[in-house]
Image (spheres, coloured by chain):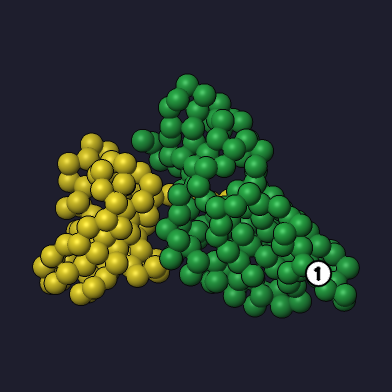
Chain colours: A yellow, B green
């Protein structure tokens, strides 16, 4: 199935990409997707610790199972205001 | 009302949204760019935003606030893009019959903004370096 990932802030800088459409296998959780996409990053564990996840503009748990057409964003610590 | 804008923020542009003949108190909060953060000099900040989600979360903050403080009127505006020293990145206005609810609601809105809005600061330092706030980069 296809999903869309939008990258912001530090993830756009670290991965050098602003968005991508991906074919993923059924049953994949958002945390597993994160681990796949950040596999090559040095501080991956630290990043995971401080990152939360959004699906279709709502916050979701890391155990969320991806669905066809989902728009995913890895949310590093927010600092609005 | 709430919005995200790239424009310079001025309180007077939003005052009419909270003015009410029966309200005797208006509290205004401006968050402005300061020149130091965690001991490091800052000369401007770039605010990046996941706009679609930020607007959804602003609506949620507005709904939560009006549920908790049904007697107030409110404005929540966040600026994105490059913001220079002492320019405002956020304006929160609240009004009510008396000052207590306006102050409390204003604080509540800012606390929720800090928790929920998918907006990120990239600080620009005088030496040309940049850093994302809240995480090493």
Q: Quadrant of the N terminus of chain A?
A: bottom left
| Residue drawn at 55 percent across, 35 percent down | B44
Q: Residue B135: x percent and y percent?
A: 40, 40
Task: Tell me, yes or no, if residue B44 can be seen here.
Answer: yes
User: Along the horizontal axis of the image, is B6 left or right of A51?
Assistant: right
| Residue drawn at 48 percent across, 62 percent down | B54
Total numbered labels: 1
Q: Residue A9: x percent and y percent?
A: 38, 47
Q: Quadrant of residue A22?
A: bottom left
User: Callout 1: residue from which chain?
Assistant: B
In the foreground, B18 or A47: B18
Taking B3 as reference, is B6 above or below it? above
Callout 1: helix, strand or loop? Answer: loop
Q: Residue A38: x percent and y percent?
A: 21, 47
Q: Quadrant of residue B95?
A: bottom right
User: Along the horizontal axis of the image, is B54 left or right of B63?
Assistant: left
In the foreground, A44 or A55: A55
Q: How many C-alpha atoms fall within 10 Å of the one at disc 1: few (<14), some, or many (≥20)?
A: some
Taking B62 as reference, is B28 above or below it? above
Residue placed under numbered mark 1 in the picture: B19
| Residue drawn at 43 percent across, 34 percent down | B131
């Amino acid at each position: 199935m296809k999903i869309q990932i939008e990258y912001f802030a530090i993830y756009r800088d670290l991965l050098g990409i602003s968005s991508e459409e991906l074919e993923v296998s059924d049953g994949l959780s958002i945390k597993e997707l994160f681990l796949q996409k950040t596999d090559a990053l040095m501080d991956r564990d630290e990043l995971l610790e401080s990152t939360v996840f959004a699906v279709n503009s709502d916050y979701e748990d890391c155990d969320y199972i991806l669905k066809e057409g989902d728009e995913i964003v890895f949310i590093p610590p927010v600092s609005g205001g | 009302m709430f919005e995200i804008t790239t424009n310079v923020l001025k309180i007077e542009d939003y005052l009419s949204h909270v003015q009410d003949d029966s309200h005797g108190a208006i509290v205004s909060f401006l968050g402005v760019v300061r020149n130091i953060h965690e001991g490091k000099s800052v000369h401007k900040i770039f605010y990046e935003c996941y706009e679609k989600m930020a607007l959804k979360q602003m609506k949620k903050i507005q709904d939560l606030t009006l549920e908790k403080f049904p007697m107030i009127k409110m404005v929540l505006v966040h600026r994105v893009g490059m913001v220079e020293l002492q320019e405002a990145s956020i304006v929160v206005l609240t009004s009510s019959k008396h000052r207590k609810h306006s102050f409390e609601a204003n604080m509540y809105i800012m606390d929720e903004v800090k928790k929920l809005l998918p907006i990120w600061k990239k600080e620009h330092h005088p030496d040309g370096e940049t850093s994302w706030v809240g995480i090493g980069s």
